[in-house]
Image (spheres, rainbow, N blue to C red):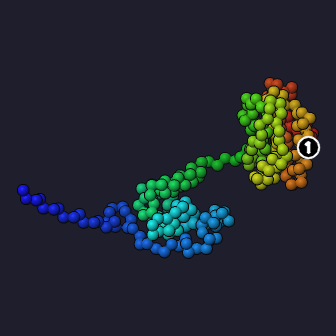
């Protein structure tokens, strides 16, 4: 039986002729290695914060690494050049990113994730943080957190100079009738948020917000320590239950009570 003729080898097709694909870039010297350690994007971000980085450096940080023959800075540069700008890049989808050599599925998803977060932040209506100038407002904010608790908990509500909430930090959990809080822990939260003032608060699981002698002592200690740091203790609010409170309020304000 005669042998069948061997079919001719398939001709290789240049990448540039494949619709939608980008040609492989030639290998380039590694720019990242040529930079001094302190001038690399990651080190600059750690030293100066990400706000000091330009679009190229930010893109390189998201990519994290390059590929064979293509360092991360060059890859980021080509990505931005292909899109035209960072703003235009935000409209790309996963297949668009993967057209570039050096960007596989993982990197493409990372980039899509960053821009999706940005879209959601920009698309969400910005709501002002609550203003907690009065004990009623602090109580309304804290009551859902304290509802149903069977142990005492303590919170620090860090405020800006307009008495708007920066952060509510839960410090401790105690027993059914006592919570243990250190003055240093309270002030650490206020300093961490760069707050100009704060509200100290804790709950009484019994529902009766009448303060104890220990509550009064802690209030005085925290106020004195806060004054040395020029941070104002606006109030200490004890969260209870209106049904149990003899005044029907459901809370006790040390400021309203004349202790601050």
Q: Is residue 205 above or below residue 131?
A: above
Give the farthest residue toward the front. 1
Q: Position of residue 203 (x, y in %)?
A: 80, 34
The structure residue drawn at horizontal position 81% and vertical position 46%, both measured from the top left corner, is 186
Asked whether residue 78 appears in the rendered view, the answer is: no
Tag 1 secondary structure: helix
Q: Position of residue 33 (x, y in %)?
A: 55, 72
The structure residue drawn at horizontal position 84% and vertical position 28%, both measured from the top left corner, is 208
Viewer-proximal residue, 253 or 16?
16
Looking at the rendering, in which quadrant would you find the C terminus? top right
Specify the quadrant of the image occupied by residue 98: bottom left
Q: Position of residue 179 (x, y in %)?
A: 82, 36
Q: Position of residue 175 (x, y in %)?
A: 80, 32
Q: Is residue 59 above or below residue 29?
A: above
Viewer-proximal residue, 1 or 144?
1
Looking at the rendering, in which quadrant would you find the N terminus? bottom left
The structure residue drawn at horizontal position 44% and vertical position 58%, both measured from the top left corner, is 104
Viewer-proximal residue, 181 or 133?
181
Specify the quadrant of the image occupied by residue 102: bottom left
Specify the quadrant of the image occupied by residue 11: bottom left
The residue identified by callout 1 is: 220
The structure residue drawn at horizontal position 74% and vertical position 38%, both measured from the top left corner, is 141
């Amino acid at each position: 039986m005669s042998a069948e003729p061997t079919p001719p080898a398939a001709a290789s097709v240049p990448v540039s002729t494949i619709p939608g694909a980008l040609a492989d870039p030639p290998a380039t010297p590694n720019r990242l290695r040529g930079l001094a350690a302190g001038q690399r994007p990651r080190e600059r971000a750690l030293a100066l914060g990400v706000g000091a980085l330009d679009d190229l450096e930010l893109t390189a940080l998201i990519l994290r690494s390059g590929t064979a023959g293509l360092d991360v800075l060059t890859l980021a540069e080509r990505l931005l050049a292909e899109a035209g700008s960072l703003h235009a890049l935000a409209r790309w989808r996963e297949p668009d990113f993967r057209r570039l050599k050096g960007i596989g599925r993982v990197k493409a998803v990372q980039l899509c994730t960053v821009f999706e977060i940005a879209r959601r932040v920009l698309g969400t209506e910005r709501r002002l943080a609550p203003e907690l100038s009065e004990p009623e407002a602090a109580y309304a904010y804290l009551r859902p957190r304290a509802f149903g608790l069977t142990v005492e908990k303590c919170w620090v509500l860090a405020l800006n100079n307009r008495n708007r909430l920066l952060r509510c930090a839960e410090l401790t959990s105690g027993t059914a009738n006592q919570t243990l809080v250190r003055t240093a822990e309270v002030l650490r939260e206020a300093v961490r948020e760069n707050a100009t003032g704060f509200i100290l608060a804790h709950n009484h699981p019994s529902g009766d917000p009448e303060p104890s002698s220990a509550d009064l002592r802690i209030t005085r200690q925290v106020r004195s320590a806060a004054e040395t740091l020029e941070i104002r203790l606006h109030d200490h609010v004890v969260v209870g239950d209106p049904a149990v409170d003899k005044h029907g309020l459901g809370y006790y304000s040390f400021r309203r009570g004349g202790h601050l």
